[in-house]
RNA sequence: GGGCGAUUGGCUCAGUUGGUUAGAGCAUCUGCCUUACAAGCAGAGGGUCAUAGGUUCGAGUCCUAUAUCGCCCACCA
């Protein structure tokens, strides 16, 4: 028998190991239809946060549901090597030990990274187990494992041979802390306080100067021109002349270019082609020299003359001081502007001229846009609005910079010898070749995740069976990073979409609606929540609290009330188990009207829940199942069942209904449902491999349902009347029915009279039931007012409904059954009014 | 500048292809230790659905503006 109180710690103990040891999570039953989900691989950088808990709980719900529906389910787990993020963490850890990666060398450093990875994989495994995730661990992959290496090289080489990957010198986003290039998506723009420094660039041979405003004076060493708009009346005559570059003293041309906006700043722009993407373009148009002035680590190089070796920000400070002394500085205008920061290191990103590898996005992205127009092959987003986000981005995206100056990652399969470049799966034959030292962007390998994890391109057994996958679950924040890239790689290499559906969820925020972040210190550890309330409560709360795609404000109070819901389920189960101990079989042939009522409700619930499970609208599942369990089953049915608890039909109904409830809740709360299910006298091997309840129209009893609904209504009105009129102790009731449910629920057996008594009367009525409560009481003004209010409300409602039904427009245009329903309601209301005023 | 989302009782959120008394949880008030559960039970109060127009027999829902908040993308010399 169940313990008296729900104890999540005790309930969740040992269950996961049981599932594992029985291989329930493993796929491979070829007699069933396949269903596959690949996990978004978490970075091996740290612990899982609440967002992961949400994301993975959603997937587990889908996979457990499908498994119970009889699919052969593969939920493929894995982790991401997270090139830059992990490398940064390992570098920091080494730093604490007084070590640095350059001193220890590439090989030893990678060993450290693998060590780090193994430690964090262990943590992640432990957390997956705590969350109860039914991932098939025998299929686990890592973005840097041997198979992925093969897939990555194959993709790189193929795209290179098609001309879709190329090496080029361009302005890229440079992270001076991690000392690597970044893609545009890895740059976060933040508003920071800065300044416009207005400088004098003297015109050659005159005492006149152009006033140049810049936010980055330290790059002036790289200036190779000054641009004005060719249509700018103020300056157009100066085009072709030269100015003297401050400090450096050399002459640079004044050029005319549309890039200079006459209405912005002074209308004069200094052009630094090696350190600004727009200036780079201007440089190409005017054939300007590109002079790099900053080193990889953000210090100034020899072109900065006496500032050489200074950090870029220190150089700015000193330079400005010097320019002020020389009278070059006109003014400093404080402004707020947005500046790119590295997503991982938070360093200010340096636009930097550098030779990198790129993916040409033009055809790849166009293919995605085209594919989305075909409803049979497109990725279907839930909710659909996110499809537009993908389309927008794919319609207008720049080439993808994929090389990273890191060590941790897939090393680029390109080899160099003198001026030769060789790109291939393996090192070329012959002497003197050396491999590219750089590695690929993490997302380059994650983009192949749905098919490369299934053995592609070599071993296609899993791939043939489970690809394309059915559903991908992820947050809207990584649609660009990941969903888009998986889609174009998949279309390019498999000819198919990577997944049929893509369920998008939002971000977790704190109670005030702020993003959870380390700097705010408002993060919540899912493991703490699990020890306080259990994984079942956490999973249910996270997955049912918002509509798909919406953010979630984390509120511990709500988590607590989810715990209460599970406690309610626990106690209802206790009641059922206490009363059905000797039940030999479930027999639903001889059942009473209360049994029929709950079975009808149950089947309607099964139908609706299944519908919303299929649509992945889990908040709607919650609304339905919560009301069914708490209101219908607990508050009403169990109370009615107490009067017929000795009947086989009632016992059977109790067990049958509870079994269905447990099964419907199982995908959400696997632990508690597993434990309760094991106590049932009649059951299958295990709930997670049992079959999902199915709607059974033979168990729909409309007449009984209507009758019991009315009984419940009547009982409720009766109680309200008693309560509102403060009827306590001795009262007597004259009622037009012998209905046992009413007598029992209202405990009327010794209060029934068939006479008209000379006492104050309180009438309670529904369509078929009518009662007069006799009670010795002076009617107060309050009582009279109450009754009048009731009558007024009813009269008003009748008037409104009559007007509606007299409107020909309504009766002719509205659906017939609606009109009928309205007529019925009107009749009911009239009858009720008659009873009340009689 | 382009796009997206939100605005519904004190708080957090639902609200299906428009269907006529707008729901839930928490909080509040009243009364109950009723043998599954006081982490509970039985009741109650509380919303002109951001604003203004429009379409319709009928609008929280569709259309057009406006306001406030939030997010994404682009630009920012």
Image (cartoon, coloured by chain):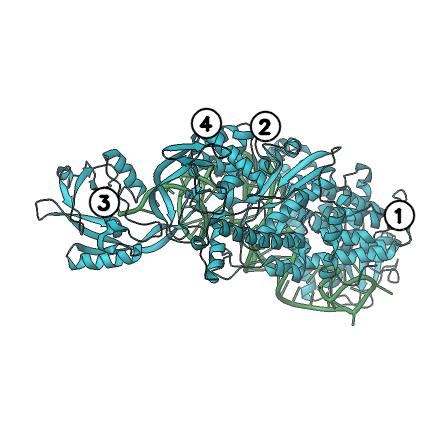
Chain colours: A cyan, B green
Q: Which residue is mark 4?
A: A162
Counting residues from the start of the chain, the first of labels 4 and 3 encountered is 4
Q: Using the numbered discs, state the Cα–Cα distance from disc 4 to disc 3 in whole angstroms.
A: 37 Å
Query: Foreground mark, 2 or 1?
Result: 2
Q: Position of residue B62 (x, y in %)?
A: 52, 37
- For label 3, the residue is A223
Quarter of the figure with the N terminus of chain A: bottom right
Reading the image, the residue beneath label 1 is A649
Residue A149: x and y, percent?
Answer: 54, 39
The numbered mark, 2 or 3, whose residue comes first in the sequence reads 3
Q: CA distance from mark 1 to mark 4?
A: 71 Å
State the residue lying farthest toward the left. Answer: A206
Q: Quadrant of residue A255?
A: top left
Q: Which residue is mark 2?
A: A376
Q: Secondary structure at mark 2?
A: loop
N-term-proximal mark, 1 vs 4: 4
**Which chain does the residue under circle 1 lie in?**
A
> Is any atom of residue A72 visible in this view?
yes
Q: Nearer the viewer, residue A335 or A438?
A: A438
Q: Could you tell me how far apart the alpha carbons at marks 4 and 2 are, in whole angstroms?
A: 28 Å
Which secondary structure lies at badge 1?
Answer: helix
Whole-angstrom CA distance, mark 2 to mark 1, is 48 Å
**Which one is in front, A644 or A675?**
A675
Q: Kindly tell me whether residue A214 is visible in this rendering.
A: no
The residue closer to the viewer here, A653 or A515, is A515
Of marks 4 and 2, which one's residue comes earlier in the chain? 4
Q: Secondary structure at mark 3?
A: loop
Instruction: Using a 10 Å C-alpha cutoff, classify the residue at mark 2 as few (fewer than 14 neighbours), some (14 to 19) or many (20 or more).
Output: few
């Amino acid at each position: 028998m169940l313990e008296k109180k729900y104890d999540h710690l005790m309930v969740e103990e040992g269950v996961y190991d049981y599932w594992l040891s029985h291989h329930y999570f493993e796929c491979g039953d070829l007699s069933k239809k396949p269903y596959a989900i690949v996990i978004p691989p978490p970075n091996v950088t740290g612990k899982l946060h609440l967002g992961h808990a949400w994301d993975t709980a959603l997937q587990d719900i889908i996979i457990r549901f499908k498994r119970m529906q009889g699919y052969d389910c593969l939920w493929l787990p894995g982790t991401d090597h997270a090139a830059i993020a992990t490398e940064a963490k390992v570098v920091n850890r080494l730093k604490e030990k007084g070590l640095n990666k350059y001193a220890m060398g590439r090989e030893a450093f990678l060993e450290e990274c693998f060590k780090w990875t193994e430690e964090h994989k262990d943590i992640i495994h432990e957390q997956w187990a705590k969350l109860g995730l039914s991932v098939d661990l025998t299929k686990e992959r890592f973005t840097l494992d041997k198979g992925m290496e093969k897939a990555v090289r194959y993709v790189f080489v193929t795209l290179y041979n098609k001309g879709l990957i190329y090496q080029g010198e361009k302005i890229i986003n440079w992270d001076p802390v991690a000392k690597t290039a970044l893609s545009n998506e890895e740059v976060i723009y933040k508003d920071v306080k800065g300044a416009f420094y207005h400088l004098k660039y003297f015109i050659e041979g005159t005492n006149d100067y152009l006033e140049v405003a810049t936010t980055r004076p330290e790059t002036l060493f790289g200036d190779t021109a000054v641009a004005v708009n060719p249509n700018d009346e103020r300056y157009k005559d100066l085009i072709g002349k030269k100015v003297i570059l401050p400090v450096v003293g050399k002459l640079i041309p004044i050029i005319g270019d549309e890039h200079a906006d006459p209405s912005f700043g002074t209308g004069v722009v200094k052009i630094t082609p090696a350190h600004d993407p727009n200036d780079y373009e201007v440089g190409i148009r005017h054939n300007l020299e590109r002079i790099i002035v900053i080193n990889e680590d953000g210090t100034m190089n020899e072109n900065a003359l006496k500032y050489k070796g200074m950090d870029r920000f220190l150089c700015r400070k000193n330079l400005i001081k010097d320019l002020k002394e020389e009278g070059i500085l006109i003014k400093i205008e404080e402004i707020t502007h947005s500046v790119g920061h590295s997503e991982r290191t938070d360093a200010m990103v340096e636009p930097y001229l550098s030779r990198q590898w790129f993916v040409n996005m033009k055809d790849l992205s166009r293919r995605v846009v085209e594919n989305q127009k075909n409803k049979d092959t497109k990725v279907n987003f839930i909710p659909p609005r996110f499809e537009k986000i993908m389309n927008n981005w794919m319609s207008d995206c720049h080439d993808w910079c994929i090389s990273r100056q890191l060590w941790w990652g897939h090393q680029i399969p390109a080899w160099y010898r003198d001026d030769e470049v060789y790109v291939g799966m393996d090192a070329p034959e012959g002497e003197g070749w050396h491999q590219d030292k750089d590695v690929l962007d993490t997302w380059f390998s994650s983009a192949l995740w749905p098919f490369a994890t299934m053995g592609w391109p070599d071993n296609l057994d899993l791939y043939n069976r489970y690809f394309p996958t059915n559903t991908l679950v992820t947050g809207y924040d990584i649609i660009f990073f990941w969903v888009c890239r998986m889609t174009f790689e998949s279309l390019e290499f498999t000819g198919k979409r990577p997944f049929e559906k893509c369920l998008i969820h939002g971000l977790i925020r704190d109670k005030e609606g702020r993003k959870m972040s380390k700097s705010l210190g408002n993060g919540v550890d899912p493991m703490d929540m699990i020890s306080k309330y259990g994984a079942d409560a956490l999973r249910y709360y996270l997955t049912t609290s918002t509509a798909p795609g919406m953010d979630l404000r984390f509120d511990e109070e709500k988590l607590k009330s989810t715990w209460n819901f599970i406690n309610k389920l626990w106690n209802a189960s206790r009641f059922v188990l206490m009363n059905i101990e000797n039940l030999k079989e479930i027999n639903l042939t001889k059942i009473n009207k209360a049994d029929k009522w709950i079975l009808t409700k149950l089947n309607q619930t099964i139908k609706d829940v299944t519908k919303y499970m299929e649509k992945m609208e889990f908040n709607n599942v919650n609304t339905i199942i919560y009301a069914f369990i708490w209101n219908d089953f607990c508050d009403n049915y169990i109370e009615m069942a107490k009067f017929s608890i000795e009947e086989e039909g009632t016992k059977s109904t109790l067990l049958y209904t509870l079994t269905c409830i447990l099964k419907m809740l199982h995908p959400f709360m696997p632990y508690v449902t597993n434990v309760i299910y094991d106590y049932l006298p009649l059951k299958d091997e295990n709930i997670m491999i049992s079959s999902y309840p199915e709607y059974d129209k033979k168990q729909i009893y409309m007449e009984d349902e209507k009758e019991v609904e009315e009984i419940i209504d009547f009982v409720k009105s009766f109680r309200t009347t008693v309560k509102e009129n403060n009827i306590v102790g001795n009262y007597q009731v004259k009622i037009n029915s012998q209905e046992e449910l009413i007598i029992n629920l209202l405990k009327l057996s010794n209060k029934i009279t068939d006479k008209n008594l000379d006492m104050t009367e309180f009438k309670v009525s529904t369509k078929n039931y009518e009662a007069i409560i006799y009670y010795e009481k002076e009617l107060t003004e309050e009582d009279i007012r109450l009754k009048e209010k009731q009558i007024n409300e009813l009269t008003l409602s009748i008037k409104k409904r009559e007007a509606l039904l007299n409107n020909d427009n309504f009766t002719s245009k509205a659906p017939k059954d609606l009109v009928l329903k309205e007529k019925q309601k009107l009749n009911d209301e009239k009858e009720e009014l008659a009873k009340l005023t009689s």
